[in-house]
Image (tube, rainbow, N blue to C red):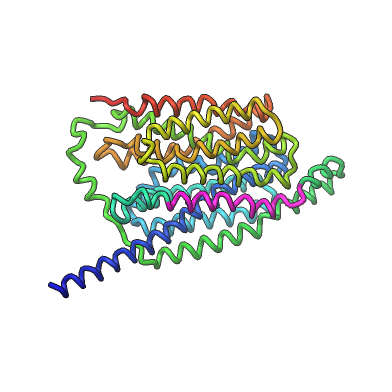
Amino acid sequence: MKNQSISDTASHKNENTGTNRSIIIIGALFFIFGFVTWLNSVLIPYLKIACELNNFEAYLVAFAFYIAYLVMALPSAWILKKTGFKKGMSLGLLVMAAGSLIFVPAAYSRTYELFLLGLFVQGTGLAILQTAANPYVTILGPIESAAKRISIMGICNKIAGAIAPIILGAVALKDVDALVENLKVMPVAQKIAELDLLSERVVFPYLIMMAVLIVLAIMIYFSTLPEVDTEQEDEELATTNSKKTSIFQFPHLLMGAFALFLYVGVEVIAGDTVISYGVAQGISFVNAKFFTTYTLIAMLVGYIIGILTIPKYLSQEKALKISAIIGIIFGLGAIFTDGFVSVLFISLLGLGNAMVWPAIWPMSIAGLGRFTKIGSSFLIMAIAGGAVLPPLYGYLADIVNPQNAYWIVIPCYAYILFFASKGHKIRTK
């Protein structure tokens, strides 16, 4: 009996070690998610100058990147069924590496369409990764500690998101204030030469990123990450919602997906427009390039507050209500103030945004039973909100002004408040 106990203890210890090692690997993936995603905040003002774009055209950066989630969410689920989680994650990283490589000919030819193609390919790789990693981190280990693992992933993601704009901004936006002024009086030939040099600044960073992604893909492919069988879970839930025949019979899921669509849109607006908006408010690129980092730091603070207060002090429902109200207040603050204070209000939207994703997701898939997987795919597709709302903001910025264009976020937060208050409770019999 004693030997059996020692054997069980050793086995449990090895299992925990394996789980911890897996969490570190997945944490590295979530770091990559955050890093690549929030590079867009620098690419938007950078490409606006290098490729001579208006606001609407510049915010197609977000469209090209996030529309991949809509296009690839369901195909990603099919790919993962064929490859398994581990090989699927490696494939996603290699696809992202291919997207990074496309930036090289895009930069040398200063072709905006090629930049957009590279961003779409990167988004495709991320869609595969997100579809695999989000459920994987939940399944990997005991369900009662899933929230802790998700929290760790979120922190990895936000820290990377805070670092990314600083690193790329230091290269792509270096001395760009003086360049923008000089471009106004340059002869055409010299202007073209200067813009070509500006465009080529991203070649080295994206080659480095490609190499890192390939190395990480190889490491994951040969890692000890365990495969997880999710089919058994479906069988256990097979009797749930036995009278339901379609995902469209779950109105709370559909309303939740729309809430998530709007949320991702305003989250991307808060992070990706704030540098350009700072410049529009008379702040130099040298200082404005840090505003997205402030947004991500605010999100990180909000995320930590959520970890400490949910569910001990706040329910997910109440946290979502508070988040929506914060969004409305700070959005109006940005519209009715000027200068640094107005820009700071946009960065502070990150504080409210942090708790929205963790709250909407479980409230939307509650009670789906055997429809949980397809419901989750709907929520992944809703990330396409990041493709639609930022260009719409850019269009409004062109026809009105960048400040009043932020009125777009107010009805979005109002709908999220409705979902938190009533929408998630609506069910069909």
Residue at 53% of width from left, 39% of height from top? 351
Q: Which residues are magenta?
A: 152-176
- The image position of residue 292, as x and y in percent, is 61, 44
The dominant secondary structure in magenta is helix
- The image position of residue 307, as x and y in percent, is 42, 45
Residue 90 placement, left or right of 402: left
Closer to the camera, 84 or 358? Answer: 358
Would residue 144 be seen by someone viewing this image from the given angle?
yes
Is residue 163 highlighted in magenta?
yes
- The image position of residue 211, as x and y in percent, is 55, 63
Q: Quadrant of residue 250?
A: top left
Is residue 335 highlighted in magenta?
no
Residue at 48% of width from left, 40% of height from top? 354
Residue 292 placement, left or right of 267: right
Residue at 48% of width from left, 58% of height from top? 94
The quarter in which the N terminus is drawn is bottom left
- The image position of residue 258, as x and y in percent, is 43, 30
Residue at 25% of width from left, 39% of height from top? 369
Residue 213 placement, left or right of 428: right
Closer to the camera, 333 or 391? Answer: 333
